[in-house]
Image: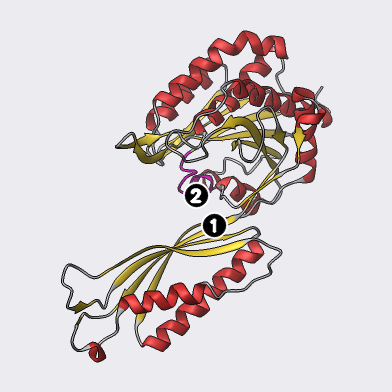
Amino acid sequence: MKQALESLRPRVMEIFEHLRAHPEISWREVETTAYLACLLRESGCRVTTFGDCTGVVGEIGAGELPLIVALRADLDALWQEVDGEFRANHSCGHDAHMTIVFGAWLLLKEVGFVPKGTLKLIFQPAEEKGTGALKMIEKKVVDDVDFLYGVHLRPATEMANRQAAAAIYNGSGQFISGKIIGADTHGARPHLGVNAIEVGAALVRELQRIRLNPMIPYSVKVTRFIAGGESHNVIPGNAEFSLDLRAQTNQAMDQLLAEVDRIIQAITALYDTQIDLSYHARVPAAEVDEQARKLLGEAIEDTLGVDQLVEPVVSPGGEDFHFYTIKRPQIKATMLGLGCGLEPGLHHPQMTFDREALLAGIEILARVVKRTFEQRGDG
């Protein structure tokens, strides 16, 4: 496999450089979808695209066995300031993920492996919005999938280059927008109204008092608060705010949300004001299948060596990959954590990593696909 992969190196790097140079933000990955659809067709895949959203799925195999193995990559870039200019930017490694997933199929093809079952390559939109996986589920893309493998680059502070983990235990994330609704009051007559800033201060204070099981990481923060105008003598009655909630398990997130709701109700009553909340996409915590994790671990050992397989990553960061197993519990899934010398960190506008890791990731995913089919009788 390594010799075959070396022959693919120029093609792999060409694909990566194209994707890196053409980033597109969530739900607008139109050119990225078209580019990947073209690559998939040229490589012999059956291709599915969607009329109402971005994303593309390639399928390979004769379907003789009732086994479907899938690889998933995310398409979207972040919108952020880079060198003084706001633009789309692949600072979370999605360009690498796409290259690795498609490269795994190229490598399998190069070594002459075509599954008797079906291999699916899922290129999913809008991971950064936390809603792309839900759209693919809505499209029934994974309804028949038995095993699902993902991949995510890991920062150097978390994992050394040329190391890999067979699972990433992402935490759950919930984002909430809120409005404090009242009326402005003259600065000399504070008794005639409610100061939205004081309400916000109470909210910050009470959120900091939440106590859950300390053995399970969690946090809740006010990440935005806007109130008042240019006049110093007007007490603002209205404000807008945002909350960021994190918990390492789905059960802890349920408890955290219940505590936030209790605090909002208490502050509403205490200040005799109105607070409206809007709940945005909730990203679930990871549910990892042990059989899939074992197969991926063996593929890592075969590729990098036994010493380079490290313990699963536990991360407070969210990943909508885990919607697949939450919504379709029959799927056996795990995600490859790939050490690649990534610095300064994920989502940093100047993020960079060792390009050689692309080849390692490709070989690992190709090996786990082959191993999964072989263990189910497709030699």
Residue that badge 2 annotates: 130
Image height of 377 relative to 5, above or below: below
Residue at 65 percent across and 51 percent down: it is 286
Q: Overall secondary structure of the magenta stretch?
A: loop
| First in residue order: circle 2 vs circle 1 | 2
Quadrant in the picture for residue 370: top right
Task: Tell me whether the residue at label 2 lies in contact with that at label 1, contact meaning CB atoms closer than 8 angstroms.
Answer: yes
Give the amino acid type for the residue marked by disc 2 in the picture: Gly
In the displayed structure image, the side of residue 32 where residue 93 appears, left or right: right
Near mark 1 (Cα within 10 A), the count class, few <14, some 14-19 or many ≥20, is many
Q: Is residue 284 magenta?
A: no
Residue at point 68% right, 10% down?
4
At numbered mark 2, what does the secondary structure look like: helix, strand or loop? loop
Q: Position of residue 229 (x, y in %)?
A: 20, 68
In the figure, 68 relative to 194: above or below?
Answer: above
Which of 55/353 is in front?
353
Q: Which residues are magenta?
A: 125-135
Q: Dot 1 corresponds to which residue?
A: 173
Residue 344 screen position, x and y as percent: 51, 36
- Please state which of residues 135 and 96 is positioned toward the viewer in this rendering: 96
Magenta residue check for 126: yes
